[in-house]
Every structure is written in structure tokens, then in C-alpha cells.
Image (cartoon, rainbow, N blue to C red):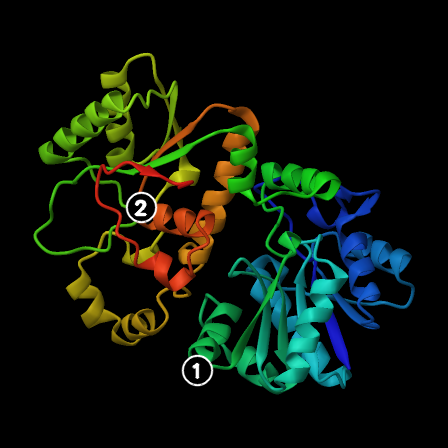
Amino acid sequence: MNTAIILAAGYSSRMGEFKPLLPLGGVSALGRLIGSIREADISEIIVVSGHMAEKIRSAAQEYSPGITVIYNENFSDGMFSSVKAALLYAKKNSKAKNLLIFPVDSPLISASSIKKVIEASEKSPGNFAIVCFMGKKGHPLLIPHKYIDEILKEKNPAGLRTVTDRHDYSGNLIRVETADEGTVLDMDVRAAYEELKEFDKHGSDISVREIMQKRGQRLYMLRHGSTKQHVGKIFLGQTDVALSDIGRKEAKIAAEIMIEKNILPSSIYSSDLKRTAETADIIAAKIGNCDVIKLPGLREMNLGNWDGRYIDEIKNEFPEEYRRRGLAPLNFKLGFDSENFYDVRYRALKTLRQILKQDNEDIFIVSHRGLIRALLGFIRNIPDEDAWELDVPRCNLIDALL
């Protein structure tokens, strides 16, 4: 027996709206999620309410009479408080062997993905299991009943992620790959909600290579020039450092090579960080009649609170985390705001898809080593471990579709 837990307690100050009751495909987000869970043959559902609790109760029971709705009086403390409230209730009242966590922010999870994670758990009982899309973790997360007490005792502000990361590195978390992009889509902000509605109507196509080949488009990528050097080696992700004089010369040489090869884009899409933006500006000025469009979606990997710090300091201060990073470099991430290889790849693909919606000419991107590796690996169908090691010299022009 499995129990589904829907976290529907919070109010989004970033959206200014109550997300669980926002319309999606003729029903509310909450109703849509309940429908998928029922379709996956999960009969026991617990909905955690908080803000506008009575409206949640009424809506939940309208879609599924007899559904259990509990109130989290500490909902303003964040999502982890709702997780704890649900697990405490389940510990006392449910005999389910597994609990599946569904944030109402992600209402387009399909029944097939839910079934897939349950099937994976049945083959490897006693382990956490999570659905992934292209390696990126999504929802739901399956929690074996035996871990309830460990989660309830967790004090780390990162909450549930602290527990799952701990078991991930000890080999007790199963990643269940699915072709369902709905598992990684959420509606944290208004733009994301609009994207959800568009996805619900039309789906999405991640085969950017095929799209561009059909159109006869080329995709060129170029890593920024050399940056100003620090005393020691640092973790350089989204820390905003400027180009060095050498980097500016490298950008001018890259522009000259492009002119020789008659690669003369009318637009350059660039990360908005200084080192990439300046590289793009130098190339555009050299080519002439070329706009630079700076996009946050083309930034380097976010390394959380390690970003911009000396590597030797990190080794001394976080020896265990640094060891974990070495063991699993593609999956490692530190805290809610940081990213790993799969997060960057998905972000890059989403950004490229948006570019392709409005640009039918050859695409020219100036970005960073990590993002270029992730995007190039996907487009050329290179195994992830090999893509992580790709050599991406500074200011070296790459024809991605070759």
C-alpha cells in the first residue's frame, strides 16, 4: 500500500496568488494532481493545508470525496513543516509501506510517472526513489515508512533534501528516469505558471537538433575569454568576474576568425555575466550590425555558497562534501539555490527552446564551459560522464550540430 501526500499549504508571495486553486486544463492545480494520483491507483491521499485551509478542504473533497485533509498550523515556516506534519499524521494513522510527496506546485505529473516510481521501489524495497527527467530530479519523491522518524528529527534548514542527500550518497536513493517533463515543471512564479499552461496544451519538444536541422539552422557556441586571475584557484560559477586584457584579445581574435569564415550573426545570445557579456560585445562590435541579447538562462552553473571561494578553503571547511563532489560530480549540489550538471543542462535547453521560438536564423551563443559541455553533450548524444570532461577552450568557436 502507498500513500500520496499533497503539500498545498503555502501562499506564493512571488506570484501574489493561491497556487493550489489556479486553473489548469479545466480544473484547479490541486484537482489535476488528485486526478493523476487516483489514476495511478493510489487510494489513500493526504492533503496538507495551511493558508486558506477551508477552501483547500472543500476543493479536495469535491474532487475526491472522503479524502483526508490535515491542517499544518506551522505552514508559514515553509514546506518542510508541511512534510513533517504529514509524516507525523501518517505515522499514527497509515499502514502504508511508502509515502509519495507531491508539491501542489507541480500539478502536471502523469499517472504513468507515479506508477513508474512505485514499480522501481518494489524492485528495490526500502530505498528512497525519485522521478527524474533527463537526469534532473523532479516529483514525486517516494519515502519508505521506515525513514519517517529520521525525517521528523531532522533540524537542518534544508530539511528533506538533507535527508535524501545523505541517503543518496550512501546508495539508498533510486533515480527513476522518465520522459515526462511535467515531473520537473513547477509554478513558483507567474511566468512558470504560464509555461505550465502552454505545456499542458501543446507539450514540448526537446529535440532541438532535429528542429534546427529541419530549418537549416546552425548552432554556434563559444566560451568567454580569459578572466582576471585570483591569488589561488576558486570555484567559479556565477561569481561575476570581468575579462582580463588577454581575454579581450581572445575575443577580438575569435571575431576575426568568424569574419574569415563568413559567420556573421545578426544577433548574439550571451550569458548576462560580465565575462560573457563583454566577450559578446567585443565580437559584435568587430562584426558590426550585430545585437547582443543577454540572458540569465545562459549563465554558468550556480555553485551555491561555494561560488567564488578558494578551493583550498572549501577542502578544509567542507571535507566530507568535497569528497562527495568527487565521487558524484554530475549529481552533486549544495543547498536549494545551487545547481548540478543536470540542472544546468535542463536550464540551457529551456533557454535554447525559447530562442528557437523567435529566431529562425543561425544561433550564436556566448556562454561558459559548464553550460556548453551540458548542452553540447545533449545535442551530440554524448554520454553524460564524457560530456562533463569535454575540452572547451576559451573563445574557440564550436559548431554544435557537427
Could you tell me which residue is drawn at 70 percent across and 77 percent down?
A: 119
Does 355 appear above or below 104? above
Give the alpha-carbon distance from disc 1 to disc 2, as whole Å. 29 Å
Residue 30's spot in the image, x, y percent?
Answer: 77, 54
Residue 44's spot in the image, x, y percent?
Answer: 81, 74
Total numbered badges shown on the rendered structure: 2
Which of disc 2 and disc 1 is earlier in sequence?
Answer: 1
Q: Amino acid at mark 2?
A: Gln
Instruction: Find disc 1 in the rendering and name its residue.
Output: 170
The secondary structure type at the circle numbered 2 is: loop
Instruction: Find disc 2 in the rendering and name its residue.
Output: 238
Q: Amino acid at mark 1?
A: Ser
Q: Residues within 10 Å of mark 2 (few under 14, many from 20)?
A: some
Determine whether, in the image, residue 317 is placed left or right of residue 113. left
Depth check, front residue: 126 or 66:
126
Depth check, front residue: 178 or 387:
387
